[in-house]
């Protein structure tokens, strides 16, 4: 059985893994979409759309 402390450690490790490995993939997808959609790199548009790209990535994988 896991204790609450164990669960917290696991949760933090999963979050770290997501930020280190998945977030860069999502940022690359968002940049590519922005260039295709608007013809230019716009960090504000990318930042606003990161949650949608994250959601789509999670649904696909």
Image (tube, helix red, strand yellow):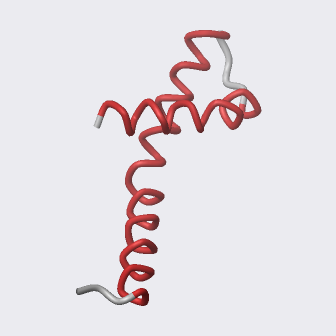
State which quarter of the image contains the C terminus: top left
* Residue 47 x/y as whole percent: 69, 37
Count the numbered circles shown: 0
Q: Residue at x 23, y 86 (%)?
A: 1
Q: Residue at x 59, y 17 (%)?
A: 35
Give 10 or 29, whichever is nearer the viewer: 10
Q: Is residue 30 above or below residue 17?
A: above
Q: Residue at x 54, y 29 (%)?
A: 30
Which residue is situated farthest in the front direction here?
Answer: 1
Q: Decide if residue 1 is on the left or right side of residue 19.
A: left
* Residue 29 x/y as whole percent: 47, 29
Q: Residue at x 38, y 39 (%)?
A: 58
Q: Quadrant of residue 34?
A: top right
Which residue is situated farthest in the right direction here?
Answer: 44
Give 44 or 4, whichever is nearer the viewer: 4
Give 35 or 8, whichever is nearer the viewer: 8
* Residue 33 x/y as whole percent: 54, 19
């Amino acid at each position: 059985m896991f204790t609450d402390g164990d669960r917290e450690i696991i949760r933090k490790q999963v979050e770290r893994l997501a930020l280190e490995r998945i977030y860069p993939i999502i940022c690359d997808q968002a940049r590519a979409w922005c260039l295709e959609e608007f013809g230019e790199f716009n960090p504000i548009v990318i930042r606003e759309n990161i949650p949608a790209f994250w959601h789509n990535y999670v649904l696909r994988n």
